[in-house]
Image (cartoon, grey):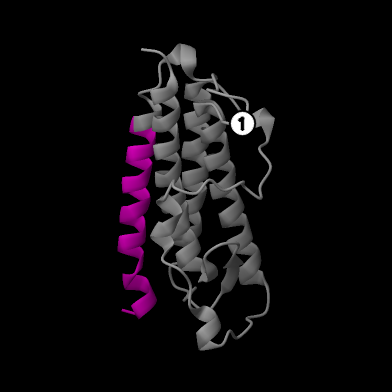
Amino acid sequence: MASHMKNLAPILDILQMSRDRFVAIANEVPANLWRESPSADRWSPAEVVAHVTMSEQFIIARSKKLLQEPLKPVPLLKRLHHPLSLITWRGRKVKTPIPLDSSLIADRPVALSRLTAAREGTLAFIESTRNQDLSAYRSPHPFLGSLNVYDWIRIIAYHELRHAKQIREVVETFPR
């Protein structure tokens, strides 16, 4: 078995764990507060789910595009990056480089259905590239450094965990 193939199980595991946690927290939001934002500069749970969906689709579309381009060698020192798990830290708020598509803001069943469809696309991409080594294909992350495609797929999970925390923070601001 090629070394890149054995790396897929941990990636699939973290994707499943992050999705389970994200959906569980999203389902804790009272239906009447789903589209409510605690302030003008904070997203509602519906907006957070739309953002997470868009981000996953963006990462997979970008990864597919990267695989179509000629491989660019990256020197070892430029391949170093910050730990991927830093994405989950909520101590520093970061503005997304991907503008929120307001047409994706929907009631919970529709929003979670779209999220599921995005994950199906991710899993289909992973399956379609199972026999390829994606570790040489790299793209810069705005805060972490140069990441390979496997790292980017892991980022989907860490990003989801970050925003699960955000939804929980938003819910805690609502009156009980």
Residue 39 versus residue 153 in the image, above or below: above
Q: Secondary structure at mark 1?
A: loop
The question of residue 6 being in magenta is answered with yes
Quadrant in the rendering for residue 70 = bottom right
| Location of residue 150 in the rendering, given as x and y in whole percent from the top left corner | 45, 66
Residue at 31%, 79% in the rendered image: 1
| Location of residue 164 in the rendering, given as x and y in whole percent from the top left corner | 40, 38
Nearer to me, 75 or 116? 75
Residue at 56%, 56% in the rendered image: 60
Residue at 61%, 46% in the rendered image: 95
| Location of residue 92 in the rendering, given as x and y in whole percent from the top left corner | 49, 49
Nearer to me, 102 or 172? 172
Q: Amino acid at mark 1?
A: Asp
Q: Is residue 169 found left or right of 79 in the rendered image?
A: left
| Location of residue 105 in the rendering, given as x and y in whole percent from the top left corner | 60, 27
The question of residue 77 being in magenta is answered with no
Residue 45 versus residue 75 in the image, above or below: above
What residue is disc 1 on? Answer: 41
* Neighbours of disc 1 within 10 Å: few (<14), some (14-19), many (20+): few
Residue 39 versus residue 61 in the image, above or below: above
For the magenta stretch, what is the residue range?
A: 1-24
Nearer to me, 122 or 73? 73
Nearer to me, 142 or 52? 142
